[in-house]
Each structure stands twice: as structure tokens, then as C-alpha cells.
Amino acid sequence: MSSGVRLAAFYIAVFAAPGAAMPFLPSFLASRGLDETAIGLVLAVQQMVRLGAGPVGGRLADALAARGRAVALYAFLSAAGVAMFLPQGGLPGLLLAAALYGALAAPIVPLADSIAFREASAGRMDFGRVRSLGSVSFMLFTGIGAVLLQNFGPDSVVLLMIFGQAATGLAALGLPSGRLPPARAGFRGAGAMLSGPFLLLLLSAGLVQGSHALLYAFSTLHWTAAGHSTTTVGLLWAVSVVAEIFLLARARALTGRFSPVQLASLAALAATLRWLGLAFTTELWALVLLQVLHAASFACMMLASLALVARLAPPELAGTAQAVHAAFGPGLGLFVLTLASGPLYAAVGGLGFLVMAVASAAAFPALALLARRLRS
């Protein structure tokens, strides 16, 4: 079986749980009696533990030169972490479940992305097309999650997440092993990649991807409060993912035509326009158009980041570099802005998207400096 097929199977599995969790986990938390601030706290804790767990998990996998087996282990353990959401443990129990799930799931996608990008660079697969199957899976499981939530209640969303993590573990057993030597330099070796350009990448990616925090945490509650059904909200999420799939299917052409910094700048612009629109409207036609911008606000930033990490980090530390980027770029940005999203949404509702617009626009100076540093 080719590496492209094995990675395609993995990406289909790995995005099942996020497809259910991202739109509907806040609804599950609300069903357990949590208010907006507490929901934001639970989601922020999940992001916070990723900051340390992702790089540590990636570094261990690189040190053992066993990224695929490490991904499988993390996925199976994270399924057990998700199951901790189900007992009636109140806010402390939900915080513990979020911490376990966040910590164990954190290294999974960065490690897989490092494997996939290596295979693509060797000409054995088209990264954009294979990765787009993960987006298809996300959309499919968002739809399944919407149906389950509406017909069987919020606990069904957690059960779907458990299924997704277990399936990810099984699919990870077939990931390409590669022939990279172990990274023997210990954790000190990972510090060598933290150059000025890498830090600027972390800052810009954190601002752009982190600005999605309010959307991820409260868009479902915001749109249903505006009168849209759960099914309609699921379809709105599907619109964003279809746009992302369309873009990723053309990733090779995009990355050949635009530099990584140009793609990142396009993502920052799209995110800023998206949040400005969401701050002032909940009209369905406008929401559909704004969700299409996800192709640029998310996917362009992801492609830019993958290319820049591969350029700035040595191959034997590819897993570590992707995990550090995921943790201290998008991860740190999402943590800070998710933590702020609960009180922000409770105070001003949808106008909180204006703060997200400011965050994404703040990436432009960092990207301009990054472009200058790369040229020099």
C-alpha cells in the first residue's frame, strides 16, 4: 500500500473527533450546566496543556525515530482521555478530561504532518490532496455530530469523539516509517531552531490561527441563539470545510505561485475581514459567504507554516519543530484568545469578533519583518 493511501486513511481518521468536538463540544459543556466563562475555561485548559505536551511528545518521537508508533500510542491514550468527559464530575471533572485529551492528542497531527510533508517532498504523494481528505472527514463528522446531537443528546458527541480517537490509533499503525536517524541531541537540540525567523513565524501563526478562538468556542451557541437550527449550524461549518478542501486540492499550484509569507499574509487579511463581518451579522447568506473565507484564514496559514517549518528546521527534528510550532504558534494563540473568549462573549456577544479582527491584523507587522529576515 502506498504511503499516500496510508496517510489518507490516517487523515480521514484523525479529523473525525475534531469534526464532532469543535462545533458541538461547547453544547455538551453547556448541557452540563457550564456558563460561557466556564466553557471558555475548559476549552482554554485543553489548549494550555498542549503547549508543553505537544513539543515533549514530538521530541520523544524524534528521539526514538518512531513517529508513527508514537502517534498510535498517543491516539489510543487520548481516546481514554475523551471518555473522562462522560462521568458527572462537575467542572473539576470536565477540566481534568479536557487536560488529558489536550495533552495526549497534542503531538498527533504535528507528527503526522511531518511524516506527510517528508513524503510529499520526496515526490511520493501530493500533500494538499491527501490532507484535504482530513477536511472531508471533518465535514462528514460535523454532519454526523449535528444529527447525533439533535436526536440523541450531547453525550453522543463525546462517544463520536472516542470513536474518532480509537480509529486514529488504528490508522496510525500503518503510517510510513521513513529512514530518518534518531535525533540524539536531547531537548537542547530543539532550541537550535528557535531563530528569529522561527519566532516570527510562531507569532504570526499564533495571531492568525488564534483569532479563530471565538469562532471555535461560541459560534454554535451564537448562531443557534440567533435562531438558526443545529442542522443549519452544521451546514455552515461544512461550508467552511468545503472551501478548505477546494483550496487544499490546489495547494501545489498555490505554493508554486506564492511564497509562504505571501500565503500567510493572505490568511491574515481573510481572517480580519471574516471577523469584521461576523461581528455585525448573523444573516444566513452573509454567514455562508464569511465561512468560505476559512479556506484562506485557516488553510493558507497552515500551508505557509508547514513550508516555513520545513525550511527552518533540520530534518531529524521535523517532528519536534512541527510540534513546537503547533504548541507555541496556533496553540498558544488559541489558548490566550480562548481564555479571553468566555468573558468577552458573555460581555458583548458577537461584537467580540472585533477583538479577533484586531488580533489577526496584528500579524501583518510580524509577517513583514519575517519576509525581510528571510530575504537577508
Image (tube, grey):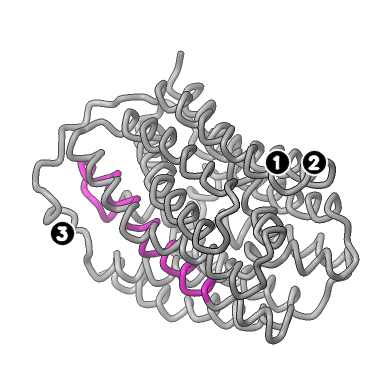
Left of 159 or right of it: where is 8? left
Q: Residue at x 47, y 44 (%)?
A: 81
For mark 1, give the secondary structure. Answer: helix
**10 Å crowding of disc 1: few (<14), some (14-19), many (20+):** many
Q: Quadrant of the C terminus?
A: bottom left
Disc with the residue nearer the chain's start (3 vs 1)? 1
**10 Å crowding of disc 2: few (<14), some (14-19), many (20+):** few
Residue 37 figure quarter: bottom right
Disc with the residue nearer the chain's start (2 vs 3)? 2
Q: Disc 2 residue type?
A: Phe
Q: Residue at x 25, y 38 (%)?
A: 61
Identify the magenta region: 311-339
- Residue 11 in picture, x, y percent from top left: 53, 34
For mark 3, give the secondary structure. Answer: loop
User: Looking at the image, which is closer to me, 262 or 330?
Assistant: 330
Q: Which mark is residue 152?
A: 2
Q: Disc 3 residue type?
A: Ala
Left of 11 or right of it: where is 305? left
Q: Which mark is residue 156?
A: 1
Q: Residue at x 34, y 52 (%)?
A: 54
What distance separates the C-alpha of mark 3 from that of mark 1? 45 Å
Residue 35 figure quarter: bottom right
Q: Disc 1 residue type?
A: Ser
Q: Which residue is mark 3?
A: 192
